[in-house]
Image: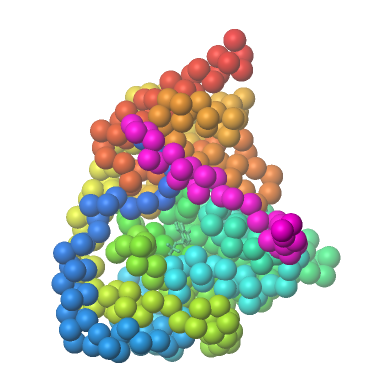
Amino acid sequence: MQFKFSALADAMKPSEIRELLKYVSVPGLISFGGGMPHPSSFPVNDINTITSDLLLEKGRQLLQYGSTQGYEDLRVQLVKLVKETENISTDKDHFVLTAGSQEALYSVSKIMTTPGEEVLCEAPTYIGTISAFRANGTVMRGIPMDENGILTEKLEEKIKTMKAAGKLPKFIYLIPTFQNPSGISLSLDRRKHVLELASRYQIPIVEDNPYGELRYSGNKLPSLKSLDKEDLVIYMSTFSKILSPGLRVGFTCAPDAVVNKMNLLKQATNLATNTLAEAIAAEYLKRDLMRKNMPAVVKMYREKRDTMIDALETNFGSDANWSHPDGGMFLWLALNDKINTTDMLKRAIEKKVAYVSGSAFYPNNPTFNTMRLNFTYSDNDQIVDGISRLAKVAKEEISLIAP
Ligand SMILES: Cc1ncc(COP(=O)(O)O)c(C=O)c1O
């Protein structure tokens, strides 16, 4: 059978990260590729106790179909969580629970855009958002960043040009804190500027914040949602980086109209997400285990970040530039601009080190000499070895290009 797919399905491409996962099991390979938490961060015993308590207490309820909007106890806990962590004031009816925030990204682009319509985002941006939006035919236009995040002057210029052409962007998608892939955070002044633009031109903002709790240095910056007085911001986050990505529990906090449409879409796509997993997350918060467990995780990741930065300094010196993130899971590395990191990846994998090349993170106009390095998944000695291997590969690459 020769299957004929839709134009949107034909436009889908496998992500470089999924391709890379094939090599994760190659013996001895050190992967800085995926965005995975360290396995020791998973509170296996807590989850075991909670699950068994929940099944004993209300197994017959939790194994039944659940509410489309998501398990109510978790939405109640989330009201407290976002108040404490992000100073967001809301109530349980403004949350929709999803299978990770990935489902929320897909949902938001589906309900907010008609195929071919444009949204603005940071360049580079999260690869999973590029796939989710592409699957809906949403066109992303990247705006460059510097070490303080998206260049809001350029964002303003772009909005003005689009307005003059009679088609404002449908929304602005941002990861303001410890951005994936760059690790960079948007400065306070620029946060205010983005909100001012959103208000002036009445453009919604989608704020994606999976990494806010992973801060290793510097001072907390207010979320866009907490600064928003006009219901401009659709805020989303996830339990993937603070509890477990395998549970697949994400949440969106949004104005009524958006919650309603997301619910309608969920009815069409999955009826409801995993109630048992949502109940586990609720109980984890209720028992105050996040507050108890996160300091050790943050300490471990701070050491990993510092180990990677030290290894980069030792092995690359002035041959490369890299970001110095205050949190999150990633560093962004720029090599000599003659190097194409996509071409180099095959040779890196032969030398048993992997990364994701930077070009994968651009919806348009990619850079080719960059890469994203994850520092949370590997052990410290693997980080040291892996960066040393990477530096050798990069040196060889230069000699291949300019013998
Ligand atoms: C910026 C960003 N958004 C969303 C996600 C999706 O996370 P999940 O679906 O596991 O909640 C990720 C995962 O790495 C991410 O980095």
Q: Is residue 5 above or below residue 19?
A: below
Q: Is residue 330 left or right of residue 370?
A: left
At x 69%, y 72%, the residue is 113
* Residue 75 sits inside the magenta stretch: no
Q: Main secondary structure of the magenta part?
A: loop
In front: 126, or 83?
126
Query: How many badges with numbers are in the image?
Result: 0
Residue 52: image quadrant is: bottom left
Scheme by which the image is coloured? rainbow
Q: Is residue 9 left or right of residue 17?
A: right
Q: Is residue 227 visible?
A: no
* Residue 23 sits inside the magenta stretch: yes
Q: Is residue 61 visible?
A: yes
Residue 185's x, y, as percent? Answer: 45, 54
Residue 306's x, y, as percent? Answer: 30, 39
At x 23%, y 48%, the residue is 300
Residue 44's x, y, as percent? Answer: 20, 62
Q: Which residues are magenta?
A: 1-29
Q: Residue furthest front?
A: 1
In front: 303, or 261?
261
- In which quadrant will I find the N terminus? bottom right
Q: Residue furthest right?
A: 165
Q: Is residue 79 left or right of residue 5?
A: left
Q: Is residue 69 above or below residue 98?
A: below
Q: Residue furthest top?
A: 403
At x 46%, y 43%, the residue is 22
Residue 396's x, y, as percent? Answer: 50, 17
In front: 69, or 375?
69
At x 33%, y 57%, the residue is 214
- In which quadrant will I find the C terminus? top right
Residue 166: image quadrant is: bottom right
